Image (cartoon, rainbow, N blue to C red):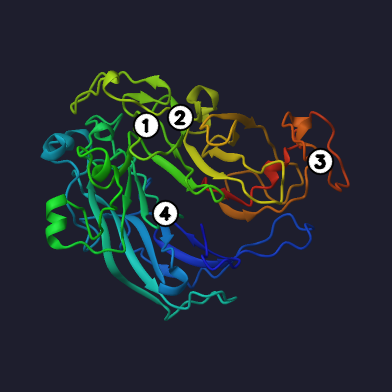
Amino acid sequence: MAPHPDGSNRVFVCNQQGKIWLAMVPEVNGGSTFTQSLLIDESDPFLDLSDQVQFATEMGLMSMAFHPNFTTNGRFFVAYNCDKFQQPGCEGRCSCNTDVNCDPSKVTSLQETSPCQFHIVVSEFTTNGTTASSKLSWKGRVNSVEVRRIFTMGLPFEAYHAGQILFGPDDGFLYFMIGDASHDNDPYNFAQNKKSLLGKILRLDIDIIPSEEEISRLGLWGNYSIPKDNPYTTTDKELGPEIWAMGFSNPWRCSFDSERASVFICGDIGKNQYEEIDVIKKGGNYGWRVYEGPDPVHLPYAPGGYTPPSSITPIFPVAGYGHDSVDTKKGPASIMAGYIYRSATDPCLYGWYIYSDLYNYAIWAAIETAKNSDNFKSFSVAFGCAHDSPMQCGFKPGVHKVPDLGVAAPSRCGYPCSKEKYSNLTKMPSSGTSDLVPSFVSLMVFVFLLIS
C-alpha cells in the first residue's frame, strides 16, 4: 500500500500477482466505527502487469514509488520479478559472474532452476490526472506501456532478493533494496563483495539518463546515473558505484522518518538466528554474513570464501529479536519493519518506531534514548483480540483502517507516558485480561493481515 502523493485519502494497493488499484480510505465517523471497508473496485485496476510479473512465493510485484514531482509529471516506478522463460522482455546480465567470483555452472547444482532464470526489474510508467479527486476510475489515463527500463538484474537464486524502492525525501534519489539472493546463508558471500549489488542498498539518479559510454564504463545495470555523492565517488572506489550501504541479508522494509529525513531505518530478515532493525548510514557495512545481528556467523560451506571479522567495521542493529524469542511453530521468524510514528492522534506513541513479525503475531515498539544517538530501547507489545472485535485476528487476508477508540491506560501494561489520558470507554477491561491493549497498538493507522 502506498498513499497518493496528492495528500488526499486515496491510496494505491498492490498485489503480488502484478495488479495495482486505486482505493479510497473511508473517513472515520467520530470514532464510532472501529473498522470500515476500503473503497476499491477490483474490476478496474489502475495498472495490470500480471502478464509481465513472475508470481511465486517470494516473487512478484514487490514495490511501487512515486517521483517527488509526481503530481506534476505523473512519473511512477514499479519493482517486480520476471522469468526469462515465461515473460517476453525479461532479460539482463546475470549477477553471478566472474566479476564477483561466481560460476553459474556451480550454482546450478544448488537448485532446480537455472541461475539467473529470474530477474529483478525496476520500470518507469506515467499517468495523467494526478490531482486530488474522488474518482477511482483510471481507464484511459495510465500509460500501461513501460516508459523506461531503469534496472534489470538476473538473480542467482530464487529467494531473499528483497525489492523495495523509495525516494529519499531530501535528495530525490531512488533507493533500491536488494537482498543477497541466496540459496542458503549467502554461500558466495555476495553481501560482503563490494563489486556485487546483492545484499546492498542502492542509490540511483533516475532523472539523468546516462550515455552508452557511461553505462559501459561504470558497468551499470540499466538507464540511471550515479549520484555525485555516492560512496564510490567520495569515499570508497572499491564499491560498486550504485552502492549506498552493504552487508544485508534481505532488507524488508525501509522508511525515512517524516520529521527527520536523515533518519533512514531498515529491517533485515535473518537466516537462522536474528531479525534486526538498522539505522542506515552512507557507506555503512551491516555485517552479514560475517555477523547475523550481533552474533558471529560460522559456515561449514562457503564457495565464495569468507570475510574475516577483523577486516570490516560493522554497524550493529539498534533493535531486533532472536529466533528463540518467537514461536517458530507458527512460521519462520520474518521481520516486518515499519515506521516512526509522527501523528498527533496518540501523544504516547509519538516518536516510537513500530515493527512486527510476519508469522508470529508479535509487535515491538522502539524509542531512541537521546536524539541522534542511534541508541534505542525496545519493548515487546503484548496484545490480543476481544471476542466481539469487528476485526478478527486470524488468517483471513485484508486491509483495515483502525481508528482510535482510546485504550484507557498504557501505563497499566507497563508503557509509561506522561501524556496519558483516559478515554470515554463505556466498559473498562479488568487488569490482567487479554483484552487490555496499549493504546499505540490500536492506533496503528493501517494493519496489514498478509498471512494467507
Name above or below for residue 112 compared with residue 377.
below
Residue 166: image tag: 4
Q: Earlier in the sequence, mark 3 or mark 4?
A: 4
Q: Earlier in the sequence, mark 3 or mark 2?
A: 2
Q: Is residue 438 left or right of residue 16?
A: right
Height in image: 423 above or below 357?
below
Tag count: 4
Badge 1 vs badge 3, beta-carbon distance below 8 Å = no
**Mark pair 4, 1: CA separation:** 20 Å
Of labels 3 and 2, the one closer to you: 2
Amino acid carrying mark 1 in the image: Tyr
On screen, residue 200 versus residue 117, left or right, reads right
Residue at figure coordinates x 61%, y 66% from the top left: 9
Q: First in sequence: mark 1 or mark 3? A: 1
**Residue underneath mark 1:** 286
Would you name the residue on which mark 2 appears? 317
Kindly identify which numbered label has been placed on residue 408.
3
Q: Label 1 to label 2, Cα distance in Å?
A: 8 Å
Labels 1 and 2 touching (C-beta < 8 A):
yes
Query: Dot 2: what SS?
Result: loop
Residue 424 rendering spot, x and y as whole percentages:
86, 48
Measure how far apart labels 4 and 2 are at the Cα level. Answer: 21 Å
